[in-house]
Structure formats: C-alpha cells, structure tokens
Image: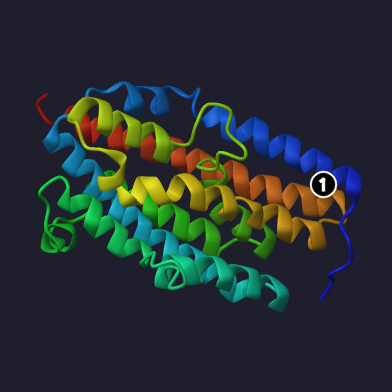
C-alpha cells in the first residue's frame, strides 16, 4: 500500500482540473434550467423527496468505494460517512437523513412521505448509473466519482455558491422558508466545503503517476456527466408540476 507524498505537479494540475470541472457544472444547460425554474410548494416537495432518495444512494456509493479502497483511504471515507450517518454528537447535529426529515417538515411533508413516495424514473436510472460506475471502476476512479458530488457542492471550490446555497436561497426567496428551517441545505453549505477536501487528501498520498491522475479525472468526469443528466431529469420532473 503506497502512502508516500504525491507528485506536486500532478497535484497542482488536479486541483485546477477539479475547479474547472466543478464550476462548469453550473454553466451546463441542465443546471441552469433547474435553477431557473420558479418554485412552488409542490415543486419543492418533489425536489426534497427525490433529493432524499439520492442522498441514500450516496451512502450506497460511498460504501462500495470504501470496500475496494486501500486501508488508509477506508479510514478517510469512514470519517466522512460517520458524519452523514451519525451526525456530530459533539455539537448536536443529527445524521443527514434526519436533516432531510426536518427540512421536509417545513414543506408539510411527513417522514412517511419520504419513504412511501418512490424515486421517479430519472432518479432510478441515474442512481443505478452511479452505483454501476463505482462498483466497476478502479478504486481511485470510484473515490473520485463519489467525491465529485461533494466537490460540486463545495464553496471552497465553487465561485458563485453551492447548489445547497442556491437552492436554499431560492426556497427562501420564492417560498418564504427561512434558511434555519432548511437544515439540509444549511448544514451542507458548510459540510461539503469540508467534505470536498477528501479527494485531495486521498490524492496527496496516492497520486504518483499520470496514470493515477487519469483514473481520478475519469471518475470525476463520468460522475459529473451523470450528475448533469440527473439535474435535467429533476428539471423535467418539476416542470411537469403546474406552476
């Protein structure tokens, strides 16, 4: 198991690539369309329910990546997932599924609504694509594929705000729901800035060759490709709900 310091030039190149690709997500037509759609309560309800299914899928993907990663990387992923699954008991922050339940309550949704409303076809397809990508990739690509969605929600990387911030401010502006009643969005504006460091932390010990670099970038690229489709599917779903 190699844990020596990474190649400095490749690390600098990777950080530039991450910044460029993560910010480019928000310039894509599907991202723009989703963020431009006027919100109604019904549309916001649909968004939160489907995002909750997607959040559970993230746990499955990270578990698969952890399973094939080297021991030192398993530990890094464990620290990341412990917050998602158990929260931060030291400051009273609950697990992130509980945050989803609390945010859903601001839209008059119950925990049963989150469980009993199934993922729509677009969600099923994209979630299956992420699982397939992680399960059938080299471990570096698998970790990168999972990390991509943290990075494109990280305000340490993005120039104009994360998806959590943009959707949170949109719900506040268009539906009058204050950010303090949107704990999922509120927490992830901070949490994903920290979680976004996971990929560079792993690369700092395992990025040694151009081949390593290509494996990481390919995982990022493929995950963000699926993510653009996912955002387009969400936009289609919300558009189907009368404004």
For disc 1, the marked residue is 11
Left or right of 119 in this view: 134: right
- Specify the quadrant that holds the N terminus: bottom right
| Residue 14 at x, y percent in the picture | 76, 42
Q: Where 54 falls versus 92 (above or below)?
A: above
Q: Decide: is 55 above or below 28.
A: below
Is residue 39 something one can see in this rendering? no
- Residue 163 x/y as whole percent: 43, 37
Q: Looking at the picture, tell me which residue is in the foreground, 223 or 81.
A: 81
- Which image quarter is the C terminus in? top left
105 left or right of 88?
left
Secondary element at tag 1: helix
Q: Residue at x 33, y 28 (%)?
A: 34
Q: Nearer the viewer, residue 217 or 110?
A: 110
Where residue 232 appears, as percent x and y from the top left, is: 35, 32
The residue depicted at 85 percent of the width and 48 percent of the height is: 210
Q: 172 or 207, which is in the foreground?
A: 172
Residue found at the very far front of the displayed protein: 91
Answer yes or no: is residue 207 visible: yes
How is the rendered protein coloured?
rainbow
Q: Residues within 10 Å of mark 1 (few under 14, many from 20)?
A: some
Q: Residue, x 84% and y 70% (percent of image)?
A: 3
Give residue 164's position: percent from left, percent from top. 40, 40
Give the residue at x 39% y 27%: 30
Q: Is residue 143 above or below residue 50?
A: below
Q: How many marks?
A: 1
To which quarter of the image does residue 173 belong? top left
Q: Is residue 126 above or below residue 43?
A: below
Q: Nearer the viewer, residue 232 or 194?
A: 194
């Amino acid at each position: 198991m190699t844990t020596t310091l990474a190649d400095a030039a490749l690390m600098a190149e990777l950080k530039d690539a991450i910044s460029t690709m993560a910010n480019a997500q928000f310039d894509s037509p599907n991202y723009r369309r989703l963020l431009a759609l006027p919100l109604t309560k019904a549309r916001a309800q649909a968004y939160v329910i489907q995002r909750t299914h997607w959040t559970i899928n993230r746990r499955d993907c990270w578990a698969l990546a952890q399973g094939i990663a080297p021991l030192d990387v398993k530990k890094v992923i464990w620290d990341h997932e412990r917050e998602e699954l158990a929260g931060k008991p030291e400051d009273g922050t609950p697990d992130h599924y509980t945050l989803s339940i609390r945010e859903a309550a601001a839209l008059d949704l119950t925990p049963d609504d989150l469980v009993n409303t199934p993922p729509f076809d677009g969600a099923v397809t994209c979630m299956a694509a992420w699982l397939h990508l992680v399960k059938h990739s080299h471990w570096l690509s698998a970790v990168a594929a999972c990390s991509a969605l943290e990075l494109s929600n990280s305000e340490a990387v993005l120039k104009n705000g994360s998806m959590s911030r943009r959707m949170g401010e949109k719900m506040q502006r268009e539906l009058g729901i204050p950010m303090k009643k949107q704990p999922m969005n509120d927490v992830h504006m901070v949490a994903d800035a920290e979680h976004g460091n996971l990929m560079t932390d792993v690369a700092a010990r395992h990025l040694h060759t151009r081949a390593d670099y290509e494996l990481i970038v390919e995982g990022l690229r493929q995950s963000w490709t699926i993510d653009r489709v996912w955002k387009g599917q969400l936009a289609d779903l919300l558009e189907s709900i009368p404004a």
